[in-house]
Amino acid sequence: MMPAFARWRLGGLRAAGSGVRRRLALAVAGLAVSGLAACGSTDPHPEPGKPSTATNVLSKGYYKVGRPYRVAGVWYTPAVDYGYDETGIASWYGPGFHGRQTANGERYDQYDLTAAHPTLPMPSLVRVTNLENGRQIDLRVNDRGPFKNGRILDVSKRGAELLGFLRQGTAKVRVQVLERESRQLAALARNGEIAGSDLIAKGPGGQVPAMVPPGEVSEAPAAPVPTVSAEPLPAPEAVRVTRVATALPSSPTVTQVAVQPSRLFVQAGAFSEQVNAVRLAQRLDPFGAPQISETEVGGQRFWRVRIGPLDGVAEADSVLTALIDGGFTQSRVVVD
């Protein structure tokens, strides 16, 4: 996987505008409700606990990448990245933000299959794998967040239910952008139409040969219980998309995949020159026992500086906070 430092350009950038600050303030308030790292909202009309009546073609929203912004001393640079593939910690957000406006102008629905990400374009489609239980679903990114260091994704309440970490609050995950689906969602959004992920025609293996024509949409009730299947998705000609009365996709599918035991680390940096990794490791001595490990990405050798393995999310959060407060703002939690 390409290290995050190769994608995130930090420092020397102008602070985000008032819209981001308003979302940050609401995110802090949301922590008191759920105890989770939540993304923000600007719409003052929440409807906690009540499913929306939106259809799968959303009436509001627009394509957005956005400008660089800073949260807790860390700069994030939104960018189009169709090769995004990261591991880390995911959290979820729900009641405190249900019905509010997302970062790209949609109305957030905790019962829909959506997610918030710090830098990916909105909308994008990502495949999220719970590395603790092997559950895997596709979620549409339509919001910014999570506004907590050490988290790479905030999923909706429904997404957390299907991924199996609603009660525990966080999970080790892998997040992969689905390029063809994301390109199609972006093209629709630029033309003023925000489509739910269930309006994307998927072929075998999740490939997307074409958008389903409008004539293929029909009225039908949503499936009450998601299916769990490892079977390949149907061929494009067999796809029939359903417009539903709630924000739930017509047939949410949870795929069960094999996962290996994984460990948590806090990575402070990765370098193409080993001497730079050694220098950083020496500076990290007061924070623990830093390790230097060698890896190869795209045929290029890197030396990673990490602290770990760590016992769990709480310890990882503690180490990460100490490093960021100590000036090592590019540090992040990784799963390996």
Image (tube, rainbow, N blue to C red):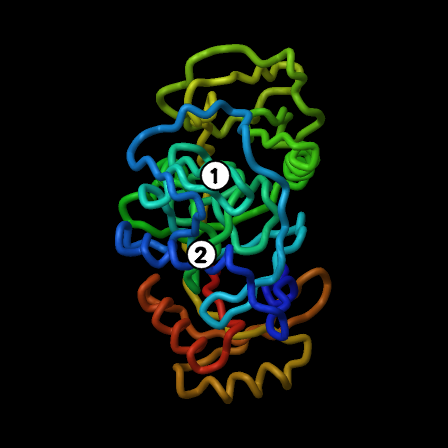
Mark in front: 2 vs 1:
2
Q: On the image, which quarter does residue 150 sit in?
A: bottom left
Q: Is residue 77 above or below residue 203?
A: below
- Residue identified by numbered label 2: 22
Query: Residue 16's spot in the image, x, y percent?
Result: 55, 63
Q: Nearer the viewer, residue 144 or 263?
A: 144
Name the residue located 52 percent from the left edge and 26 percent from the top edge: 231
Name the residue located 59 percent from the left edge and 32 percent from the top edge: 194
Query: Residue 206's spot in the image, x, y percent?
Result: 61, 32
Q: Is residue 168 above or below residue 113?
A: below
Q: Nearer the viewer, residue 279 or 49?
A: 49
Q: Nearer the viewer, residue 283 or 217?
A: 217
Q: Is residue 243 left or right of residue 11?
A: left
Give the position of the N terminus as an image quadrant. Answer: bottom right
- Residue identified by numbered label 1: 114
Report, in whole angstroms, how far the alpha carbon at label 2 lies from the one at label 1: 21 Å
Query: Residue 173's spot in the image, x, y percent?
Result: 45, 50
Q: Is residue 240 above or below residue 109?
A: above
Query: Residue 20's spot in the image, x, y percent?
Result: 50, 57
Tell me the element at label 2. helix
Mark toward the start of the polypeptide (2 vs 1): 2
Tell me the element at label 1. strand
Q: On the image, which quarter does residue 204 sit in?
A: top right
- Which disc number belongs to residue 302? none
Crowd tier of the residue under label 2, counting other residues whose Cα lies within 10 Å: few below 14, some 14–19, many 20 or above: few
Name the residue located 50 percent from the left edge and 88 percent from the top edge: 283
